[in-house]
C-alpha cells in the first residue's frame, strides 16, 4: 500500500474514524469494522481510528466496582474504566493484522491526550499527537483507545500521567479532538444509527434523516436528550471547525454532516425535535419569599454536584412562593436527601417530586428571529390534549416539560405541525460540496 501511495501524486487524505461500542460489540463485528477500515486504507488514506469499549463493557465495569464498594476511589475507577477501550483498541488492531494491514493500538495517553484532573468527567486540556503522526508516517493505521487521557499537573498533586476518563460517551470527544489536532480531512463517527434525524425514529415513524445540521442546532439536540453524540464532542467540533459526519457502521449509506450551515436561512426554521425521559420535577411548597432563599436551595444542590435545570419561581402570595425545577431522574433520590433538611430549616411547607415527566424540545437556528413558534408549539400540544407543566427557551430552542405518558403523542403532533417530514427546501448536498 505504501508503494501505491508513492505513485499517487495527490497527498494522502487523513481520515479520523470512530466506532462506537455496538459497532465493536463482538469478534464478528470487530472483524467487520476491520474490513471497513481496510477498504478505506486501500484507497490510500491515512487513518486514525478511535474505538469505544465493546458493547456494554463500561456498564459491566461500573457494576463490578459497585459490587466491591458503593463509593469507589475515582482514580481507581478511571484505571478500571480505561481498560474497556484498551481491549477494543488492541482487538481491532489484531483484526487488521489478520487482514494484512499494518496497524498499532495506542492508549489515550500514548496518543498525546492530556486532560484536567476531574476523574470520571475530565476535559481535554491538550492534544500532542506526535506519536500518532510518527506511526502514520511508518505506514500504520493508528487505533486509539477512546474516552481517556492522562492528567496534566505537578508531582505534588499526585503527578502527571494519571489516567483519566472523559465522561460517558467520551470516545466521540477523543475523535473530534484528534481530528482537530491532526487537521484531518474528515472526522467520521460510525454508530448504530444512520445519522441525525428530525426526531427519534423509534418514537416518530415519520422522522427523516437530515443531510446537514449546524453545530449550534446539534449542540441543543444533544443537550436536550438526542443521544447520538456526546455534547462535548459537538462543542469541540464547533470551536475547531471540524466537520463531523455521523453514519451507520452496519450499512453503506450517506450519513449526516455536522458543520457550519450557511443555508440555515432557507431551511425550515424548526430542524428537529429532542426528548429526554431522564427528568424529574421537584417542587418546594410555600417557601418564604425573601432574599437568600434561592441560594439556600440551589447552593447545596450545586455542592452535591446535582444538575438543576428549568427553574420556575412563581409570584409570591402572603410572603410565600412555590419553586419548581427539574433534575436528572437518576439524581432525584440524592436531591431529595439534600433538600429535606433545607426545607425544614427555612420553614417551607414541604417538598413534592414527580419522576414521571419528560422534556420535549423544538430546535432550530432560525427560531430566535421568528415570532409565533412558541405559540404554535403550545397550541399543538393543547390540541393533542397534552398539558404543559414547565417551559424554558434559548435562542434556538423551546422546551416543555410534560407528563411522560404523553411523550409519544406530543412528539408525533409536533413533528406534523412543523412539517418535519417534508424534505428541506434546499438540497444541501447539491449546494455544498463535501470536504475532501
Ligand atoms: N465506553 C464509554 C461509555 O460507554 C465511552 C464511549 O462509549 O464513548 O460511555
Ligand atoms: Mg458507549
Image: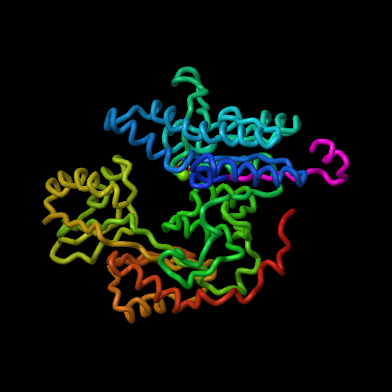
- 200 is higher (above) or lower (below) than 112: below
Query: Is 312 situated left or right of 237 in this image?
Result: left
Image point 42% across, 58% down: which residue? 224
Q: Nearer the viewer, residue 1 or 82?
A: 1
* Residue 109, picture quadrant: top right
- Is residue 99 found inside the magenta-colored segment of the image? no
3 relative position to 46: left or right:
right
Give the vertical position of 133 relative to 380 (above or below): above
Q: Nearer the viewer, residue 95 or 49?
A: 95
Measuring 52% from the left and 31% from the top, which residue is drawn there? 86
The x and y percentages for residue 327 are 30, 53
Observer able to see residue 321: yes
Q: Quadrant of the N terminus?
A: top right
Q: Position of residue 118 (x, y in %)?
A: 43, 34
Position in image of residue 387 (x %, y %): 28, 73
The answer to whether any part of residue 368 appears in the image is no
Most extreme residue toward the bottom is: 383
Residue at left offset 64%, top offset 48%: 187
| Depth check, front residue: 363 or 246 | 246
Quick check: is 4 in the magenta stretch?
A: yes
Q: Is residue 13 left or right of residue 166?
A: right
Which span is picked out in magenta? 1-18
Q: Image check: 261 left or right of 161?
A: right
Colour scheme employed for the rendering of this structure: rainbow
Residue 334 falls in image quadrant? top left
* Residue 253 percent across, percent down from the top left: 62, 60
- The tally of labels here is 0
Amino acid at each position: 500500500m505504501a508503494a501505491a501511495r508513492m505513485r499517487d501524486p495527490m497527498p494522502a487524505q487523513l481520515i479520523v474514524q470512530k466506532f462506537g461500542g455496538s459497532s465493536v460489540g463482538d469478534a464478528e463485528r470487530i472483524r467487520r469494522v476491520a474490513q471497513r477500515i481496510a477498504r478505506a486504507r486501500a484507497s490510500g488514506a491515512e487513518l486514525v481510528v478511535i474505538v469505544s469499549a465493546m458493547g456494554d463493557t463500561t456498564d459491566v465495569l461500573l457494576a463490578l466496582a459497585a459490587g466491591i464498594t458503593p463509593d469507589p476511589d475515582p482514580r481507581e475507577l478511571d484505571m478500571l474504566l480505561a481498560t474497556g477501550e484498551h481491549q477494543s483498541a488492541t482487538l481491532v488492531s489484531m483484526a487488521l493484522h489478520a487482514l494484512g494491514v499494518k496497524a498499532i493500538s495506542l492508549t489515550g495517553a500514548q496518543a498525546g491526550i492530556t486532560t484536567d484532573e476531574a476523574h470520571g468527567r475530565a476535559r481535554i486540556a491538550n492534544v500532542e499527537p506526535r506519536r500518532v503522526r510518527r506511526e502514520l508516517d511508518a505506514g500504520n493505521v493508528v487505533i486509539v483507545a477512546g474516552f481517556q487521557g492522562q492528567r496534566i499537573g505537578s508531582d505534588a498533586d499526585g503527578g502527571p500521567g494519571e489516567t483519566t476518563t472523559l465522561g460517558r460517551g467520551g470516545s466521540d470527544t477523543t475523535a473530534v479532538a484528534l481530528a482537530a489536532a491532526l487537521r484531518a480531512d474528515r472526522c467520521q463517527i460510525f454508530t448504530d444509527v444512520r445519522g441525525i434525524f428530525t426526531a427519534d425514529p423509534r418514537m416518530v415513524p415519520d422522522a427523516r434523516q437530515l443531510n446537514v445540521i449546524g453545530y449550534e442546532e446539534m449542540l441543543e439536540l444533544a443537550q436536550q436528550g438526542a443521544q447520538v453524540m456526546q455534547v462535548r464532542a459537538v462543542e469541540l467540533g464547533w470551536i475547531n471547525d471540524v466537520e463531523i459526519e455521523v453514519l451507520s457502521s452496519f450499512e453503506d449509506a450517506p450519513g449526516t454532516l455536522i458543520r457550519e450551515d450557511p443555508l440555515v436561512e432557507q431551511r425550515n426554521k424548526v430542524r428537529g425535535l429532542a426528548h429526554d425521559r431522564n427528568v424529574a420535577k421537584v417542587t418546594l411548597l410555600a417557601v418564604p419569599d425573601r432574599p437568600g432563599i434561592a441560594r439556600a436551595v440551589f447552593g447545596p444542590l450545586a455542592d452535591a454536584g446535582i444538575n438543576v435545570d428549568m427553574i420556575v419561581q412563581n409570584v409570591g402570595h402572603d410572603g410565600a412562593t412555590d419553586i419548581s425545577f427539574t433534575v436528572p431522574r437518576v439524581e432525584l433520590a440524592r436531591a431529595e436527601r439534600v433538600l429535606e433538611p433545607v426545607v425544614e430549616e427555612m420553614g417551607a411547607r414541604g417538598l413534592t417530586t414527580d419522576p414521571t415527566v419528560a422534556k420535549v424540545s423544538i430546535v432550530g437556528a432560525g427560531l430566535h428571529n421568528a415570532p409565533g413558534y412558541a405559540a404554535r408549539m403550545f397550541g399543538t400540544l393543547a390540541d393533542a390534549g397534552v398539558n404543559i407543566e414547565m417551559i424554558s427557551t434559548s435562542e434556538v430552542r423551546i422546551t416543555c416539560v410534560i407528563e411522560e405518558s404523553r411523550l409519544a403523542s406530543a412528539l408525533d403532533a409536533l413533528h406534523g405541525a412543523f412539517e418535519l417530514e417534508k424534505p428541506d427546501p434546499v438540497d444541501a448536498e447539491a449546494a455544498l460540496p463535501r470536504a475532501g
